[in-house]
Image: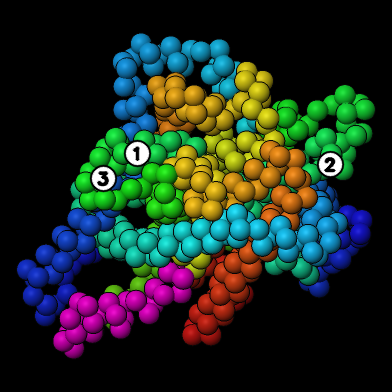
Amino acid sequence: MRPREDFPGSSGAARTMGRVFLIGVAVLYLAVFLLLPLITVFAQALAHGVVDYWQALGDGDALAAMRMTLTVAAISVPLNTVFGVAAAWAISKFEFRGKGFLLTLIDLPFAVSPVIAGLIFVLVFGARGWFGEWLSDHDFKVIFAMPGMVLATTFITFPFIARELIPLMQAQGRDDEEAALSMGAGGWRIFRVVTLPNVRWGMLYGILLCNARAMGEFGAVSVVSGHIRGETNTLPLHVEILYNEYNFVGAFATASLLAMLALLTLALKTLLEGSHPELRSARTRKASAVPPRLAPR
Amino acid sequence: MKIGDAARLLRRPRRQQILPGFGLTMGYTVTYLSLIVLIPLAAVVLSAYGLPLARWVSVLAAPRVLASFRLSVGASLIAALVNAVFGLLIAWVLTRYDFPGRRLLDALVDLPFALPTAVAGIALTTLYAPGGWLGRLLLPLGIKVAFTPLGVVVALSFISLPFVVRTLQPVIADLDQDLERAADTLGAGPLLVFRRVIFPALLPALITGSALAFSRALGEYGSVIFIAGNIPQVSEIVPLVIMTKLEQFQYREAAVVAVAMLLLSFAMMFMVNAAQLALQRRHLGKR
């Protein structure tokens, strides 16, 4: 940690007062606006005691929603991981025209509202969509079924892992890989033995953030799910249904599971950042003023 | 245009490249990008494109749609401003000062990223409802948050806080403290040092962070719909209007509103990227 000595020539007492005031405001703001909602989730979930809480979680529809959430994440996170690795390899190890444009396209889903992310798949695969007729002829449901939810979730979480891996692999350059190549290693072997060990923590970090978003996504899957209980509900959608039925204990009990997932994600993320300071959330890192890789070669 | 053509357009390199796998990884990247992102996005544009201009105008100029755009843009702007002020303060405190619990609070800042929006939505609604912990305190003051436009602002401020804080933190950490010390020795008070030395250095990052917060807030759905009350023309946001049109099977109208919104978001994104680029150029120029 950097030294935090007081400046010379200033009145120490006034400075300390100012510091205490600023810290106080920041702590109060975070406590009221971030911590209080989090506490509310658990307080409401346990409002009628532990027995009701457990009962709400053991409910058949809740269990089905858990299964659906896990299934959707288990498909879309690996898809985006493979994409992230491929995109990072192409972008970081080669020079080509239009690289900046490609990076912008990869970022596009960040700028799209979740509701629109759901809408686009309804327009393509819905009953009146491009492939709607063909799909119903072949008795294959995408919208109001699991495939649509996987697609919408994959769209929403599309950039997460690529945006972690690309800057990391760019910073590492290609010297190691070229050395391995000169010693006769093939492409796959170079990736497995040289590249992967270098980026595995960044990859894990990306997967962590991607998974949290995939399991928590609401707007996009809400559009494509059709809200069929026990069939196409994920945990966030189940929360909405219970809440709208005024089943607050059930809604907050389910919400508490998602809140625990969020806390676990934050804890692991903080741990990873502690041991690997080069990792930072992709959505904000590109905004930091001086990216090291900008230094001219 | 076929995908293969697109891959060829992204042309091969001037410098000799000896590593294998360009064709495979680039081909996969472009194909996957097209299938998941580009083609579906094109669907919404094409779907709206099929409507005559007069219908476009009548859809977008409908009072309910216009009001939703006013609310979405207005509330997102206010949320971005709130976060510009408090985000700056929080980033400063977390980066410059050491106090017990600092690391915990620092980790907590990312909560809105990690907490599913529906969970945030019902928690905020319960908290600010007339009988809730905060609603009960605000009610005697005549302030109603839940089920009003103010509730929309609260939810949007919640979800977009991390953007400002996380954008500013590395920049604050990189600030040259010698400048502050020099200004201090020359007799400038803390406020003057902040105004003349610190703030100008942070301004670009502050603008970037606030713009990111704004664009995130603009598209937000889950955390807002619970607390907003969703009264047409009063507390109904644009994503909800799209959702309503979808539920009434007005697909093309939904697509028109969606395209208008996408144009707004993309314009924001390009502005942020352009500002970013200008900033980086300026920085490189200084070196």
- Magenta span has A172? no
Q: Residue at (64%, 36%) from the top-left corner?
A: A221
Q: Nearer the viewer, residue B222 or A170?
A: B222
What subunit carries mark 3? B
* Percent x, y of residue B187: 16, 87
Residue B205 magenta-drawn?
yes
**Magenta highlight: main SS:** helix
Residue type at mark 2: give it: Gly
Cα separation between marks 1 and 2: 40 Å
Snapshot colouring: rainbow
Evaluate if marks 2 and 3 touch, with contact meaning CB atoms under 8 Å apart.
no
Quadrant in which residue B13 is drawn: bottom right
Does dot 1 land on a helix, a strand or a loop? loop
Q: Which residue is mark 1?
A: B129
Residue type, numbered disc 3: Leu
- Circle on res. B139: 3
- The answer to which image quadrant residue A246 occupies is top left
Q: Is residue A199 visible?
A: no
Residue at (65% x, 48% y) in the render: B242
Question: At numbered mark 3, what does the secondary structure look like: helix, strand or loop?
Answer: helix
Residue A141 shown left or right of residue B63 in the figure: right
Q: Is residue B236 visible to us here?
A: yes
Q: Nearer the viewer, mark 1 or mark 2?
A: 1
Eyeballing the image, is B133 above or below B271? Answer: above
Chain of residue at mark 2: A
Q: Magenta region: which residues?
A: B182-207
Task: Specify whether A123 is left or right of B152.
Answer: right
- Alpha carbons under labels 2 and 3: distance apart: 48 Å
Residue that mark 2 sits on: A129
Residue A180 x %, y %: 71, 52
The amino acid beneath tag 1 is Ala
Depth check, front residue: A67 or B181 = A67
